[in-house]
Amino acid sequence: MSINAESRLRLGVVLALTSSFMVVEIIGSLLTNSLALMSDAFHMLTDVGGLSLCLLASFFAMRPPTPKRSFGYYRLEILAALLNGIILTALVAYIFFEAYKRLLNPPGVLSFEMLVIATIGLAVNLIGARILWHSSKESLYLGSAFLHVAMDSLGSVGAISAGLIILLTGWRTADPMASVAIGLIMVPSIYRLVKESFNILLEGAPEHISPKEVESSLLGIEGVKEVHDMHVWTITSGIHSVSVHITTDRPEEWCCILEEARKVLKEGFKITHSTIQIEDEERHKLHVSKEDKNH
């Protein structure tokens, strides 16, 4: 689903905020020698890439369909979301690897400077999350953009906690442990993002739509005898599609049955893109019988 101009503007503002502070946090992580801060900085780096991909995909999604691409460029949203998930997976692996090395030999960290930078980072992330909140339900890639920023907020909280602990107690192991906590917090959300993206690319049924319920609803239409060869899939966020064959013993009512089927799909499942083939029951049985004999 293409996003509106207001949501695109919000995405651009958050991208500018994130890009600006990313530079500050990367420099700060190097100066303070903090892995927790470095983890948050690299996460912000992936945010910049992810937000850029989302913004680029939103412009491509506006392009009209062509004879060769009848659905237009809607799937770019899903590809961008999947790429975001893959990048985040690589980031978590890197965080765990670095944390392991630092747990064996915790280095010194400039805790006060780390605390100041992490606190500013939290403020930037909260502002970004607030800006994207109202648009996050609009599409998968806006949802993934919000997810990036929200997880960065958790990362900043982890870095702040580590900075406070080191500052008050001198326990340097708090820095790599905070990094591990940040990584563990990210894992479930990344899994859901990648899983949903794969499901859409593999033409799987949307999680909130049960094919059995769709079939049952269509069978409830008066005159419908059988539902077969049904496929339910997602084109992009908020746009779902169905193709189905319906048999009836009332060929004179085909038009009424077709309209009722479209109404059931639209009102019951929010499916507006449907391809429905109405078949005469007797002819369908004859066709199936011939196919069985050929096999």
Image (cartoon, rainbow, N blue to C red):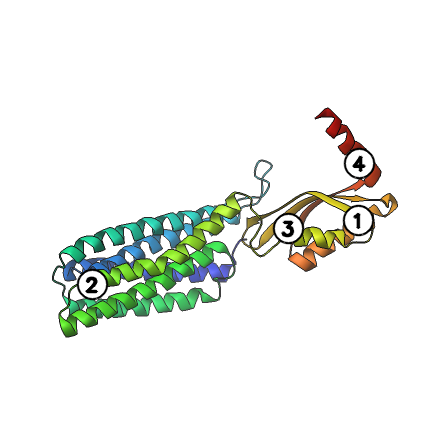
Secondary structure under tag 4 reads helix
CA separation, marks 4 and 2?
70 Å
Query: Is 86 positioned to the left or the right of 75 in the image?
Result: left
Q: Nearer the viewer, mark 1 or mark 4?
A: 4
Label 1 neighbour load within 10 Å: few <14, some 14-19, many 20+: many
Marked residue nearer the N-terminal end (3 or 2): 2
Residue 292 figure quarter: top right
Query: Is label 3 in a helix, a strand or a loop?
Result: helix
Q: Is residue 3 above or below residue 120?
A: above
Ranked by sequence position, the earlier of labels 4 and 2 is: 2
x, y percent for residue 61:
51, 48
**Which class describes the residues within 10 Å of circle 4: few (<14), some (14-19), or many (20+)?**
few
Query: Label 2 to label 1, Cα distance in Å?
Result: 65 Å
Whether 130 is drawn above or below 179: the answer is: below
Is residue 12 visible to the viewer in this orientation of the structure? no
Disc 3 and disc 4 in contact, CB within 8 angstroms? no
Q: Which residue matches tag 3?
A: 211
Give 40 or 14, whichever is nearer the viewer: 40
Cβ–Cβ below 8 Å for labels 4 and 2?
Answer: no
- Snapshot quadrant of residue 287: top right
Q: Residue furthest right?
A: 252
Relative side of 114 to 247, left or right: left
Q: Residues within 10 Å of mark 2 (few under 14, many from 20)?
A: many
Front disc: 4 or 2: 4
Q: Residues within 10 Å of mark 3 (few under 14, many from 20)?
A: some
Secondary structure of the residue carrying numbered label 2: helix
Name the residue at 37% across, 47% down: 86
Mark 2 sits on what residue?
Answer: 175
- The residue wearing badge 4 is 285
| Above/below status of 107 relative to 53 | below
Q: Position of residue 141 (x, y in %)?
A: 46, 54
- On residue 224, which mark appears? 1
